[in-house]
Image (cartoon, rainbow, N blue to C red):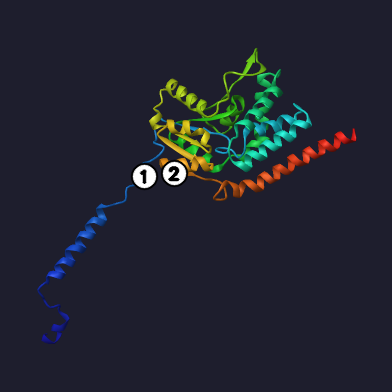
Amino acid sequence: MAALGWLTPRRRSATARSVLAGEASAEAARKSTQEVPEREPEFPVPGDERAAAFFDLDNTVMQGAALFHFGRGLYKRKFFETRDLARFAWQQAWFRLAGVEDPEHMQDARDSALSIVKGHRVAELQSIGEEIYDEYMAERIWPGTRALAQAHLDAGQRVWLVTAAPVEIAQVIARRLGLTGALGTVAESVDGVYTGKLVGEPLHGPAKAEAVRALALAEELDLGRCAAYSDSHNDIPMLSLVGHPYAINPDSKLRKHARRMDWRLRDYRTGRKAAKVGIPAAAGLGAVAGGTAAAITLHRKRR
């Protein structure tokens, strides 16, 4: 048996360094089982009935501006003449290229839309809005943003669109997406017929924040537990109103502000910057606008 003694480990006294190494190893093992990285709290919180989500529409939920797509649908139905098509096409091209809402362009678009619908029945425009959604809007919904909205719905929370687009259009889109409802610009009507005027002002910028605040009060929501999503720096008042603001496909000003405020960002565009995807699309729309304008000019010369 003595010959096999070399197989039996010898007992040796531990040195100070080996003791230190052993203790350090044991401590590391203990910590590895205790220090589990903190997981981000579940959001949205399931069953929180006092929480809701508010989504901007243009370039947040849908590519481009709803009002311009609506204008295309109305043109197809001969609500206005060919000379107005070039303006709608150019406005949409500019919007896609710049990736931001220009107050002057948006005001021009709203004025055009109001003049076009004046004298028409509200029910007629609501019915046409359903058709236009299928023709021009359904394929432009951002899947990523749609998934965010669905997450809130799955958690049992209410979800509203908040947009400067006419409320009738916004309600159609909200209904098609299965959302709770929509806040939008209200056009005046008398006996169900549009007058060509607005009730108050367009739901833009600070007005969106006021609409959300009023709805939250009426629905007994806790804004600190609510979320808001937008692509535009114009919606900073609305985003600042809630406890969970998100910058979605943000313009440069909103991106800077979101980073400074440590807001969450999501970008569902194919490129890192809006310009990388906006330029080709806008160039195509610009060509449509230019081609339409050229056709109108040629037509007038021939007359």
> Residue reaching furthest right?
303
Q: Position of residue 294 (x, y in %)?
A: 80, 40
259 left or right, relative to 82: left
Say which quarter of the image contains residue 284.
top right
Q: Amino acid at mark 2?
A: Arg
Q: Amino acid at mark 1?
A: Glu
Q: Quadrant of the C terminus?
A: top right
Q: Look at the picture and state if 5 lies above or below 60.
A: below
17 left or right, relative to 198: left
Circle 2 SS class: helix
Disc number placed over residue 72 in the picture, else none: none
Question: Which of the two labelled residues, at mark 2 and mark 1, occupies the earlier sequence position?
Answer: 1
Q: Quick check: can you spot residue 92?
A: yes
Q: Quick check: can you spot residue 48?
A: no
Mark 2 touches mark 1? (CB < 8 Å): no
Q: Position of residue 46 (x, y in %)?
A: 39, 35
Q: Nearer the viewer, mark 2 or mark 1?
A: 2
Q: Which residue is mark 1?
A: 40
Q: Position of residue 241 (x, y in %)?
A: 43, 30
Q: Nearer the viewer, residue 111 or 22?
A: 111
The crowding category of the residue bearing disc 2, from other C-alpha atoms within 10 Å (few below 14, some 14 to 19, many at least 20), is few
Q: Which residue is mark 2?
A: 259
Q: Position of residue 202 (x, y in %)?
A: 58, 25
Seen at 50% across and 27% down, the residue is 206
Give the Cα separation between the discs numbered 2 and 1: 19 Å
33 left or right, relative to 263: left
